[in-house]
Structure formats: C-alpha cells, structure tokens
Image (cartoon, rainbow, N blue to C red):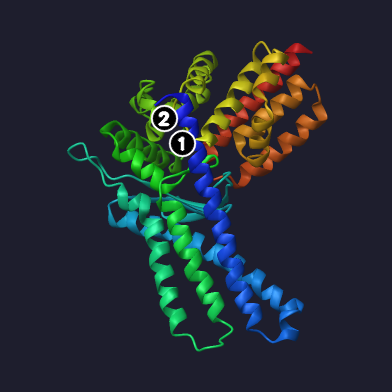
C-alpha cells in the first residue's frame, strides 16, 4: 500500500469516527427531546429539566468509561494478565506493592485506560483478544441490560428516557472502540487487536510493551530494563502499529540514556518512514527532537520547521505531560531567552510531577531540564 492509499484509508477511518460521534449526539438529542416532550410543559421549559439532561449525559459518559475500563480489567484478569493501573479521565490508580495509590495523568484522545502486565508467551502465542476487546464486550453487555430495563419501565416514566440513553451510549461506545479505526491521535481497541493478530512479531511487540508497563509500575527506568526489549524492528515491520510502538520505546530508552545523537537519528528515520505509528507517539517524538535541537546546535529554522501548528496544538493538548513540559521549558529558556517564562513552566512541571504515576520518568525528565538549564548558563 503506497502513501496515498494509506492517507485515504486514514481519512476514511477518521470520517467513520466523526460519523459515529454525530450519531451519538443525534441519538442522545432524540432521547432527550422525548424526555422533554413527556414532561410537564412548565417544568420542561425550566432550568430543572435542562439540568437533569446535562447531569444525565455527563453521568452516562462517566458510567460507560468506567464500564469500558472495567471490561479490560475483568477480561485481562480472566486471561492471566496482572493489574498495573486503572485510569478514568485524569484520575489514575496505580499498584504500588500491595497498595493502590491515586495519581493524575491525562492523555489526549483517551477517556480512560487499564494497563496490565502480560502473561508469559507460550509456544509463540499469548492471549490478547479478550483483553483488548473486553471493554467493548462489557459496554455492549451493559447496554443490553439497560435496553431490557427500558422495555419494562412504566409508560410515561421520567426515568425511561435516561435508561434508554444508557443503553444507546453503551452500544455506541462498544462499536466505537470495537470496530477497528484510528481516532485522532490514538488507535482504538479493535485496531490494536487487529494489528496484533497479523503477525507473531506484533504479538511479541505487544508483550514487550506491556512488560515495560509492568516494570514501570515497579519504578524501573527504561535504561535499566532488559536491552533486548528495545530492539528496533525493521522499517517494513513498523507498518504494523503495534510493532511501531517498539521502535518508539527504543527512542524513549535512548532519551533516558541521554544518547541524544542516536535518539535523534532514530526518531528522524521513524518519523520520515511510512509506518503505522499512532499520532500521539509522533507528536511526542517531535517534542524530543525539538529538545535535542535546542540543547545542541539550536538552529531556529530547524526548530520552527518542527514546531508546526499541528505540533503546537498537540503540545497544548498534552501540556501537563512531563516530556512536553520539559520541551516547553527548553523552548522558553534556549530559544525565547525568557527565563521568567521558563521558571513558570518548571513550576508547572514540579506540580505535575507530584501526582504523576511514574516517578522514575519525572526523575529522567528532571535531569533533562537541568541539562537545558546548564546549556543556557554555558551560552550566557
């Protein structure tokens, strides 16, 4: 498949996602119109009715996000995975020994995430379908339960439209996550499951990815993990989105080791290649390349070429992410020569670091911030 065909496929996948979102809005709107039309006129025109609608929609969103991630957890445990973390919006519960600790993490394009350590690979195989699709299965099952409840609700019941809303959003969420598609900066669960199924190399890459998650939950830095986990796949293999993650992790390890020339060369090659890399990984790699340029030759034209409108928008959406804050700090200090703004960003970093789930990552990023500060002093 050439680049033009891939772009067309990606565009169609984005279009499907938009269509589903529009349908979700339309379905919710129709259900709520039914609620208003079935209410007393005076009440339906009042603040109370609209407050009920808002609360109902918000509750539905939270509920099905929780159900979805619980599905990953349940089906993961059933197939031999071990619990690492559970995130709903920006609230993340991380396993720390025998305890759970509440941390904060936001990732653009994701409402939640359940990360688990993988079972051992046996005979070159590992279970992955139920773990990846468990969220959609749970959404569909709960949606079916609410649909059954709707049919037994009394006629004219004020709760019936809300019960139907919970059913509809359950089915829509199941489809949105279960049917393979790329949604903005991330791939959905169905897309990941399909990518893993395509080759044993993809299955191995998925195992490595989750093994790194497991080690990270124990506080191990990337540079201290087994070197063989960070083998860079062949360019052709990285057309598979799951295999491409392994290349991204190799870049991340080089950054942790502060092998900047090697990291920049690998990132440049990966970003130029026709790979299956997800948008969120592309954006974060560009952040790292901008940082390397800033602490190196610091060519303004090279930095501005990487800092496109799309990249700036991405960085804004990930503004509390440690590596993004580190890059913003270096930009303020080394490009803009604005020490006051840099200190403000560093204060934001310190605040975010206190609740970030992986302290070893913030330790690594803190070292890179100090390196940028030393470069600034050396150029003064």
Whole-percent x, y for residue 260 in the image: 54, 17
Q: Is residue 111 visible?
A: no
Residue 165 higher or lower than 245, as above or below? below
The image quarter in which residue 310 lies:
top right
Kind of element beneath mark 2: helix
For the N terminus, give its image quadrant: top left
- Circle 2 is placed at which residue position? 244
Spot occupied by residue 121 in the image (x, y as percentages of width and height): 24, 40
The mark closer to the camera, 2 or 1, is: 1
The vertical placement of 306 against 38, above or below, is above
* Looking at the image, residue 67 lies above or below residue 122: below
Q: Position of residue 167 (x, y in %)?
A: 47, 70
Inter-mark Cα distance, 2 to 1: 18 Å
In the image shown, does 278 or 364 lie closer to the viewer? 278
Q: Residue at x 70, y 12 (%)?
A: 299
> Left or right: 319 with respect to 111?
right
Observer-nearest residue: 115 or 198? 198
Up the image or down, 91 lies above or below 322; here it is below
Q: Which mark is residue 9?
A: 1
Disc 1: CA contacts within 10 A as few (<14), some (14-19) or many (>=20): some
Q: Residue at x 43, y 68 (%)?
A: 143
Label 1 sits on a secondary structure element that is helix
Question: Which one is nearer the viewer's eye here, 125 or 142?
Answer: 142
Given contact means CB atoms under 8 Å apart, are the residues at marks 2 and 1 in contact?
Answer: no
In the rendered image, the residue lying farthest to the left is 123
């Amino acid at each position: 498949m050439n680049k033009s065909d891939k772009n067309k496929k990606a565009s169609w996948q984005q279009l499907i996602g938009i269509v589903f979102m529009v349908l979700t809005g339309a379905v919710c709107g129709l259900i709520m119109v039914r609620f208003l039309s079935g209410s007393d006129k005076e009440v339906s025109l009042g603040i109370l009715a609209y407050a009920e609608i808002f609360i109902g929609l918000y509750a539905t969103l939270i509920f099905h996000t929780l159900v979805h991630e619980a599905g990953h957890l349940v089906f993961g445990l059933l197939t031999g995975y071990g619990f690492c973390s559970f995130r709903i919006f920006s609230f993340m519960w991380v396993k720390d020994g025998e305890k759970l600790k509440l941390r904060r993490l936001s990732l653009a394009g994701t409402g939640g995430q359940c990360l688990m350590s993988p079972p051992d690979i046996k005979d070159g195989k590992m279970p992955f379908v139920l773990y990846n699709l468990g969220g959609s299965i749970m959404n569909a099952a709960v949606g079916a339960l609410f649909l059954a409840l709707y049919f037994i609700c009394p006629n004219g019941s004020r709760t019936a439209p809300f019960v139907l809303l919970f059913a509809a959003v359950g089915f829509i969420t199941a489809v949105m996550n279960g049917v393979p598609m790329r949604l903005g900066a991330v791939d959905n669960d169905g897309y990941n499951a399909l990518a893993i199924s395509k080759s044993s190399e993809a299955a191995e890459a998925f195992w490595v990815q989750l093994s790194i998650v497991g080690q990270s939950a124990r506080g191990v830095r990337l540079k201290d993990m087994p070197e063989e986990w960070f083998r860079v796949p062949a360019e052709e293999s990285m057309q598979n989105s799951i295999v491409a993650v392994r290349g991204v992790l190799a870049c991340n390890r080089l950054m942790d080791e502060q092998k900047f020339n090697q990291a920049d060369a690998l990132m440049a090659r990966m970003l130029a290649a026709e790979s299956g890399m997800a948008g969120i990984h592309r954006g974060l790699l560009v952040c790292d390349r901008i940082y390397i340029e800033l602490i190196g030759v610091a060519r303004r034209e090279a930095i501005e070429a990487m800092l496109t409108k799309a990249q700036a928008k991405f960085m804004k959406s990930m503004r509390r992410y440690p590596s993004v804050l580190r890059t913003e700090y270096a930009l303020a200090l080394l490009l803009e020569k604005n020490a006051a703004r840099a200190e403000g960003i560093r204060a934001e970093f310190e605040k975010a670091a206190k609740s970030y789930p992986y302290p070893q990552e913030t330790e690594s990023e803190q070292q890179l911030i100090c390196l940028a500060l030393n470069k600034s002093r050396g150029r003064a």
